Image (cartoon, grey):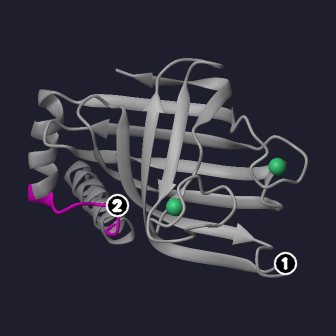
């Protein structure tokens, strides 16, 4: 009887792993890569994390108020420049930008500088109301680059560039290069750390 219970438990555990492998396959690298990545991360990983709110320090869209955003990210950068992590930057209702009360740039971080001061990945960009009341626009597989300065409020900075789209849209500080170059943002709350 005991042996039967143990065998049942082993099968149950195996099934759980099998289920996880199926549902998480989009986010799970191949086993061989995972092992290599684990070895690399164990060598000289740099962890960059941050979260809080920011101000652009200017009224970028000319609507009478200084613009800002919410953000959060965490990434571990390996010595080969590859990275694992996630980045989110959004306007979430209490801060508007370009009249967009809800927008979000979210996606995995896949590469980073070895000093942790910049990282990049591919995002999904969601915009609400840009093309009409209640219209949600979703842009997928948009490359992004973020540069950061560590510290707390008034010290830490974050600059987001979204590549290949929105060039020349209000808020773009370098028009004509094909990218959406947002102004450097300074933290008003939260912190950015590089370890
Ligand atoms: Ca504004
Ligand atoms: Ca631009």
Residue farthest along the front direction in this orientation: 176
Magenta stretch secondary structure, dominant: loop
Q: Quadrant of residue 78?
A: top left
Q: Is 2 or 83 nearer to us in this picture?
A: 83
- Magenta region: which residues? 25-32
Residue under circle 1?
134
Q: Determine if the C-beta at disc 1 is less than 8 A from ligand 1.
A: no
Residue farthest along the right direction in this orientation: 64
The residue positioned 69% from the left and 69% from the top of the image is 127
123 to 135, vertically: above or below: above
Q: Quadrant of residue 153?
A: top right
Q: Tell me the SS state at disc 1.
A: loop
Q: Is 75 or 173 nearer to us in this picture?
A: 173
Q: Determine if the C-beta at disc 2 is less than 8 A from ligand 2.
A: no
Answer with left or right where residue 73 lies relative to residue 118: right
Residue under circle 2?
16
| Chain-order first, disc 1 or disc 2 | 2
The residue positioned 58% from the left and 50% from the top of the image is 182
Answer with left or right where residue 156 lies relative to residue 55: left
Instruction: Give the image location of residue 86, x and y in percent.
Output: 44, 48
The residue positioned 51% from the left and 48% from the top of the image is 160
Question: Does 26 lie within the magenta span?
Answer: yes
Give the mark toward the camera: 1 or 2.
Answer: 1
């Amino acid at each position: 009887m005991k042996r039967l219970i143990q065998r049942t438990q082993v099968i149950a555990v195996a099934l759980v792993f099998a289920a996880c492998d199926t549902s998480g396959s989009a986010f799970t690298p191949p086993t061989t890569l995972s092992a290599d990545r684990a070895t690399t991360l164990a060598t000289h990983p740099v962890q960059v994390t941050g979260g809080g709110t920011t101000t652009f320090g200017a009224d970028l869209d000319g609507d009478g108020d200084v613009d800002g955003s919410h953000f959060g990210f965490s990434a571990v950068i390996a010595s080969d420049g590859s990275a694992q992590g996630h980045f989110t930057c959004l306007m979430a209702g209490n801060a508007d930008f370009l009249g967009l009360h809800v927008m979000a740039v979210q996606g995995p971080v896949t590469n980073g500088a070895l000093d942790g001061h910049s990282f990049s990945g591919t995002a999904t960009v969601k915009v609400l109301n840009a093309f009409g009341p209640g219209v949600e626009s979703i842009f997928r597989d948009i490359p992004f680059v973020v540069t950061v300065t560590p510290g707390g409020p008034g010290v830490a900075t974050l600059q987001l560039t979204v590549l290949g789209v929105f060039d020349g849209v209000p808020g773009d500080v370098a028009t004509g290069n094909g990218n959406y170059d947002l102004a450097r943002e300074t933290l008003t709350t939260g912190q950015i750390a590089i370890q």
